[in-house]
Image: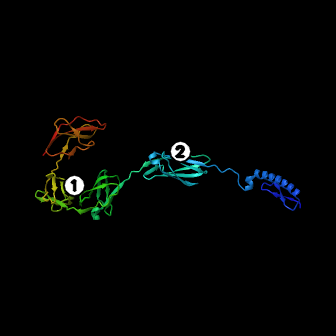
Amino acid sequence: MKTDHTKARTGCGFYSAKPHARSCSRPFIQKSRSLLAAALLSSAAFSCGCAGFVAGQNTNPPPPTYTISGTISPSAGGSGATVTLSGTGSATSTANSSGAYSFTGLANGSYTVTPSHSGYTFSPASQNATVNGADVTGLNFTATAQTNTFSISGTITPTAGGSGATVTLSGAATATTTVNSSGAYTFIGLANGTYAITPSHTGYTFSPTSQNATVNGANVTGINFTATASATFSISGAVTTSGAALSGAAVALTGPAAANTTTNSSGNYTFAGLGNGTYTVTPSNTGYSFTPANQSVTINAANQTGVNFTATVTQSHTVALSWIASVTTTVTGYNVYRSTTSGSGYVRINSSPVTLLNYTDSTVANSTTYFYVATAVDSNGLESSFSTQATAVIP
């Protein structure tokens, strides 16, 4: 028997002797064992030199990874906060007791970091970070404790009295709101505390007139009111002159409500739809004075009648002035002066030189005495001295 040494290819491209056993004499077998041992040692050496290749493994180093980190302050809001990573990769992390957080093992790419913590808001709400061959640090946030707020709400019925009503809040906070078309109102953003709610609407009364509400960790609802149309009243009277009706006279009302009206052909006037309160009634008409000049009237759950006035014709007076022409040929006009003091205090009453030899003063007052003088004005604007004084007595 002889031994056939064949070659077996190893994974590294080397060859080693591989015996093929056949029948042989013992001495040859011993020799073959020695050769086999040498061949195995040689094969082992080759195999150990390229074990990774032989095993079919990639020996390239893994790609590098990086970290995104930051801090949430103050630590009271940061400690225990959840920080979410999204983008090229996603993960969550919990900020430690100092408010610090980090995401490790990140590949290059774009990420968004978003903190959250019950009872807190964050500024900014989130931040973007780009990993590009280096760690990203200093991605910090500020936590602000949320203040829980609540609301007070209710309705005013019927909607005719509720819609458009004003509701006032006082107490732990103050505010006003307007009731919507359904009669509903709401005050929001309220802290715990005691409040008073009071509705108002012209022409309506409310039941109850006001309500208290206590906010204690929850919204308060059902603070409702009932609106009732208020009773209204009137003020009326007449205006006469010399015992006869004065029609067309203007009458003004001021006070809790304001209005204007005119006397009818019988001299009568009326203001209707008025609530309780004190009003002032004032008549007027060109060419008349009134007695009294006005009247104060108080409505207290009843109509007020007989608020009458007497009109007196106011006489209108004028003063007609005339003078003799100046003998100076360069005179182009005249100025007229007036005073209520004889011999002094004259004030010009014409706006531009008078080219005629007369002038009518229609701005005089009753029971007043006036003193007049005139001057001549030439083409150069030079003015003469005063003329002789004239006197007019207005009754």
Q: Point out the tag, 1 or 2, that comes first from the N-terminus.
A: 2
Q: Secondary structure at mark 2?
A: loop
In the visual, does 346 lie left or right of 139? left
Q: Residues within 10 Å of mark 1 (few under 14, many from 20)?
A: few
> On screen, 345 above or below 306?
above
Residue with the most extreme left position: 243
The amino acid at mark 1 is: Pro
The crowd level at tag 2 (other Cα within 10 Å; few <14, some 14-19, many 20+) is few
Residue 151 image point, x, y percent: 34, 56
Disc assigned to residue 256: 1
Give the camera-side residue of 216 and 304. 216
Residue 306 horizontal/vertical position (percent):
12, 58
| Image: 351 above or below 25 | above
Q: Which mark is residue 3?
A: none
Task: Say which of 324 and 134 sits in front.
Answer: 134
Residue type indicated by callout 2:
Gly
> Image check: 265 left or right of 53?
left
Q: Which residue is mark 2?
A: 138
Say how the picture is coloured: rainbow
Residue 135 visible in rendering: yes
Q: Which type of secondary structure does the marked residue at label 1 adopt?
A: loop
Give the position of the N terminus as an image quadrant.
bottom right
Mark in front: 1 vs 2? 2
Query: Along the horizontal axis of the image, is 282 left or right of 10?
Result: left
Seen from the viewer's position, the closer of residues 84 and 161 is 84
CB within 8 Å, label 1 to label 2: no
Q: Position of residue 348 (x, y in %)?
A: 23, 40
Residue 73: image x %, image y %? 47, 45
Q: Is residue 270 visible?
A: no
Residue under the point 80% across and 52% down = 41
Q: CA distance from mark 1 to mark 2?
A: 66 Å
